[in-house]
Image (tube, helix red, strand yellow):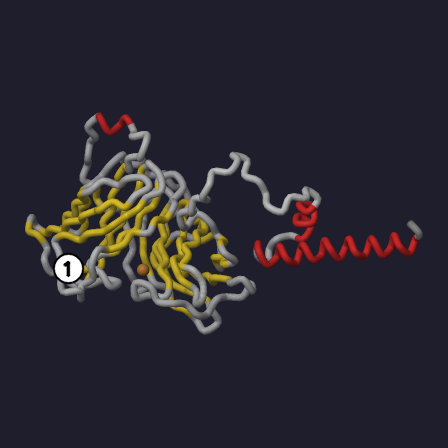
Amino acid sequence: MNTATRVAAFVVAIAAVFALALGAGRVFGPNNEPAAVAHESHGGAEEPESPQGDPGEPEALPGGLMISQNGYTLALDKAQATPGKAVPVAFTINGPDSRPVTTYETEHEKQLHLIAVRRDFTGFQHVHPRLSESGVWSTNIDLTPGQWRLFADFKASDADALTLGADLAVDGDYQPVAQQRQSRTAVVDGYTITLDGDLKAGSDAKLTLSVTRNGKPVTDLQPYLGAYGHLVALRSGDLAYLHVHPDGTPDDGVTKPGPDVVFYAAVPSSSTYHLYLDFKHDGVVRTAAFTVNAGGGTSAPSAKTTPQVETPAETPAHGGHGGH
Ligand SMILES: [Cu+2]
């Protein structure tokens, strides 16, 4: 090989690596380092092999576990905050072009649902931030010291619905609250809410929540987010965020405004789940919290054979729904 050929070959090789990097950049998003891609290209394999071999259909990931997915990133203005009531929180959803997304589709009557919960499952809040023209979302949430998780549940125009999650560290000493094994009755502001139905890993389960006040069934619940209740489920241990669908809408002529509110929830694994029901009555939105265990398909937990102590739980402190 003469010098000219060598130089030409080198240029071609550089161009090839650069092209690979550009191509990968489109697939993996703008934050991928070209160097890492160039390194990977030495391996030769186009598709990375799973260490467990090929398990067939890839399992769909639950929402909320990642800060970045499908090219969209939840970017908090600050990853740290001071504790307090109505602490301002701001963020953007950055799109595949790295710029803040400014157009969204409405789901459950809102363009974006923000869920905030401390990692020990206290302080749950479900708020609806305001969107500025430049794509900045802002709201206020009540924060106590500890590690918080923020979930943004949204659908950018021309993209799939996503739930992205990001951590927010709140200054100060705190004592993590011990988790209950199971809690199917919640008491909040004089309302008692009971949860009936069992979660099952891998399939839809029917959950019925019944609302009573002073021992009497509440039969005049008010629509909230297009339903008589809004339910969020979070998996113990990693706070995977699960979609729960209400059964029926207030205007369908069939669904009654209480005392029962029915949901269908599909959980991905046998585990403990924390459920939060937002319901509206007498013009106020309140949150009831529950903890339930989901049985598995093939390996049912042995704990099922022993009776479990169920303690009525006072709903953990939660802030107002100021974002509405
Ligand atoms: Cu919402």
The answer to which image quadrant residue 220 occupies is bottom left
Where residue 114 sits: x, y (%)? 37, 58
Q: How many numbered marks appear?
A: 1
Q: Nearer the viewer, residue 75 or 233?
A: 233
Residue 279 visible to an observer of this rendering: no
Q: Residue at x 24, y 55 (%)?
A: 246
Residue where numbered disc 1 is placed? 255
Q: How crowded is mark 1: few (under 14 residues within 10 Å), some or many (20 or more)?
A: some
Q: Which of 122 and 70 is in front in this view?
A: 70
Using the image as rendered, state which of residue 152 and residue 48 is in the foreground: 48
Where ligand 1 lies, by image quadrant? bottom left
- Residue 30 at what x, y percent from top left? 59, 58
Residue 232 place in picture, x, y as percent: 30, 51
Q: Looking at this rendering, what residue extends furthest in the left direction?
A: 216
Q: What residue type is labelled 1?
A: Thr
Image coords of residue 179 (percent x, y): 31, 36
Q: Is residue 275 visible?
A: yes
Q: Is residue 292 left or right of residue 104?
A: left
Residue positioned 45% across, 49% down in the render:
167
Q: Residue at x 25, y 45 (%)?
A: 205
Disc 1 within 8 angstroms of ligand 1 (CB)? no
Choose between 59 and 168: the one closer to the eye: 59
